[in-house]
Image (cartoon, helix red, strand yellow):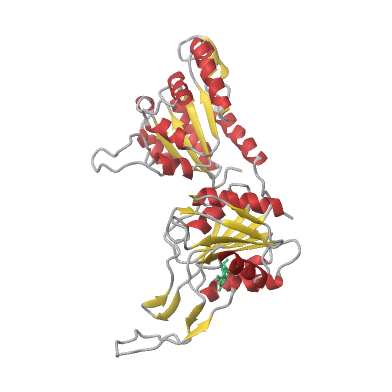
Amino acid sequence: MLKGKHIILGITGSIAAYKAAYLTRLLIKKGAEVQIVITPAGKEFITPVTLSALTGKPVVSEFFTANSGEWHSHVDLGLWADAMIVAPATASTIAKMANGVADNMLITTYLSAKAPVFVAPAMDLDMYKHPSTQANLKKLQSYGNYIIEPASGFLASGLEGKGRMEEPEKIVEYLEQFFSKGALFAGKRVMVTAGPTYEKIDPVRFIGNYSSGKMGYAIAEAFASQGAEVTLISGPVNLSCSSAIERIDVKSAKEMCAVAMSKFETSDIAIMCAAVADYAPKEYSTSKIKRHGEMTVELVPNPDIAATLGAVKKENQILAGFALESDDEESNATLKLQKKNLDFIVLNSLADKGACFGYDTNKITIISKNGEKESYPLKNKKEVAQDIVAYTLKLKK
Ligand code: C5P
């Protein structure tokens, strides 16, 4: 259930910080990708070197890297995460979280996190019982955060009572249960095409387009985080995806079509997000074409992958496409939906600022085969992907 999940582990200044190393290990063993964010006090209890050796990623603690001045974006981290766990969570960090005291990277990340947040308190029994701590924990619950209650037992102070951070195995169990409940697409196979295609002219030249692949990758991640088995058929892009996703790299439209055809047979859902080149050079020159005055490259149409799948689509399959339009947007998108036999089409307009190629944001309208329309405001592509997943859920067969 945790395979491929992006998890932020927030570590604070408690003696239980040593257990965070084991928690990290367990999460990684389950296939999660873990990013540690540690408070300055947390570093007094456990070294970032230990933690980064376990996660394979630098530990984030400061807003800036001292030497280079490089800024660490808590906003990007907050969007990257499928879950944030604060373990151990001290009384001080809990109070800061409850009241938005954003004076360290852990709290700014918490305030930016869109994912569910889990808090595993660790403190002395009297600190835990104090009405202030209890009120702060209630506040966190009222924000929708999940409190992983501490256990009772011997405490570092020598006292005995409630306040010991829950054992790492139990925290992992808690998360697994949480994610199995939220897995809206468990057991479903989803295929996503993404990015541009490159159509070769000669060994050094091609016809391509500006597609970054960000939208398709975000859709693949969004389905995977809902428990779907995702295959991402990707054109040449500069992106990476979580290990839970089967990624198949292709270059040309023909290659993409062949892979998509074979994967579609066993897919429940296919989202065609790639910006496939409509044409490819008729001839491929095996040697580099020399400059020789005017030249013409003759083009032939590529297969329409979405339409090819639409023609063989079975009753129990959902097929969706994208339409990038500059004029008569809705009527053009509707025509495409019909021609390709799609269940719904996601329309983005070139006229919208901040939408489409290269941007991190997008503004979409979804049109269904029944002609129903739903328009969404400009959002981050990750949130747009979640809207598309939620829309697909309504049609799930
Ligand atoms: O016809 P148009 O290219 O505008 O249609 C866009 C939709 O069709 C997108 O979903 C795109 O991924 C898909 N498509 C395709 N194969 C093509 C062209 C477009 O799958 N050759």
| Nearest to the observer: residue 115 or residue 234 | 115
**Vertical position of residue 181 compared to residue 314: above or below:** above
Rendered view: 379 above or below 293: above
Q: Quadrant of residue 153?
A: top right
Q: Residue at x 45, y 64 (%)?
A: 211
Q: Nearer the viewer, residue 361 or 241?
A: 361
Question: To which quarter of the image does residue 200 belong?
Answer: bottom left
Q: Quadrant of the C terminus?
A: bottom right
Residue at point 43%, 37% (across, down): 36
For the N terminus, the quadrant is: top right
Residue 141 x %, y %: 57, 25
Q: How many marks overall? A: 0
Residue 27 image offset from top left, x and y in percent: 53, 39
Whether residue 125 is visible, yes or no, is: no
- Res 239 → quadrant: bottom left
* Residue 240 image offset from top left, x and y in percent: 46, 55
Tell me residue 366's x, y (percent). 61, 57
Residue lying furthest front: 328
Given residues 359 and 306, the one toward you in this image is: 359
Q: Residue at x 62, y 40 (%)?
A: 179
Seen from this angle, which residue lies furthest left?
67
Q: Taking the image as drawn, is residue 75 in sight? A: yes
Give the quadrant of ligand 1: bottom right
Q: On screen, 157 above or below 362?
A: above
Seen as rendered, the residue at the extreme right is 315
